Image (cartoon, rainbow, N blue to C red):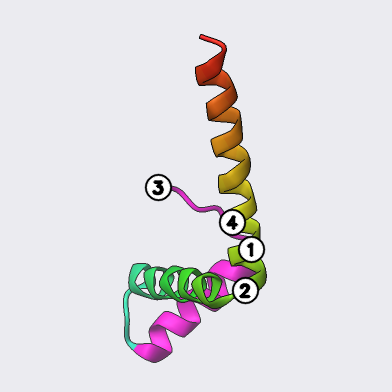
């Protein structure tokens, strides 16, 4: 996987990793895990997810019915 950061983001990330004495990749993984967990706890996100899943199911049902 590739991630593109601005110079400022890269510098800030490297600073955080250095201060925490962790690898940059560890800091990135932790941030991604935290973001995902926050989404799991976010009712608005969960409602949006359920709506998208329902729409996908309807589309699949229509597609299966047209074959």
Q: Which mark is residue 43?
A: 2
Q: Position of residue 33 (x, y in %)?
A: 41, 71
Residue in front for this viewpoint, 20 or 40:
40
Query: Do the CB atoms of the residues marked 2 and 1 lie less than 8 Å apart?
Result: yes
Placement of 50 over or under 57, stated as above or below: below
Q: Residue at x 50, y 53 (%)?
A: 3
Q: Which mark is residue 47?
A: 1
Tell me which numbered mark, 3 or 4, is placed earlier along the sequence.
3
Q: Pick out the residue farthest to the front.
A: 65
Tell me which numbered mark, 4 or 2, is placed earlier along the sequence.
2
Query: Do the CB atoms of the residues marked 4 and 1 lie less than 8 Å apart?
Result: yes
Q: Position of residue 39 (x, y in %)?
A: 55, 70
Boundaries of the magenta span: 1-20
Distance of mark 2 from mark 1, alpha carbons?
A: 6 Å
Instruction: Provide the residue designation for mark 3.
Output: 1
Instruction: Provide the residue designation for mark 4.
Output: 49
Residue in front for this viewpoint, 54 or 19:
54
- Tag count in the figure? 4
Distance of mark 3 from mark 4, alpha carbons?
A: 24 Å
Task: Using the rendered image of the protein, determine whether residue 7 is visible from the camera's viewpoint.
Answer: no
Q: Is residue 34 left or right of residue 56?
A: left
Residue 14 inside the magenta-drawn segment: yes
Residue 13 inside the magenta-drawn segment: yes
Placement of 35 over or under 65, stated as above or below: below
Q: Residue at x 48, y 68 (%)?
A: 36
Q: Is residue 35 left or right of residue 47?
A: left
Q: Position of residue 55 (x, y in %)?
A: 63, 40
Q: Residue at x 64, y 52 (%)?
A: 51
Magenta stretch: dominant SS?
helix
């Amino acid at each position: 996987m590739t991630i593109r950061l601005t110079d400022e983001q890269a510098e800030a990330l490297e600073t955080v990793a250095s201060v925490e004495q962790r690898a940059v990749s560890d800091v990135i993984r932790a941030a991604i895990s935290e973001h995902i967990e926050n989404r799991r706890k976010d009712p608005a996100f969960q409602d949006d997810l359920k709506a998208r899943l329902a729409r996908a199911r309807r589309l699949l049902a229509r597609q299966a019915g047209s074959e």
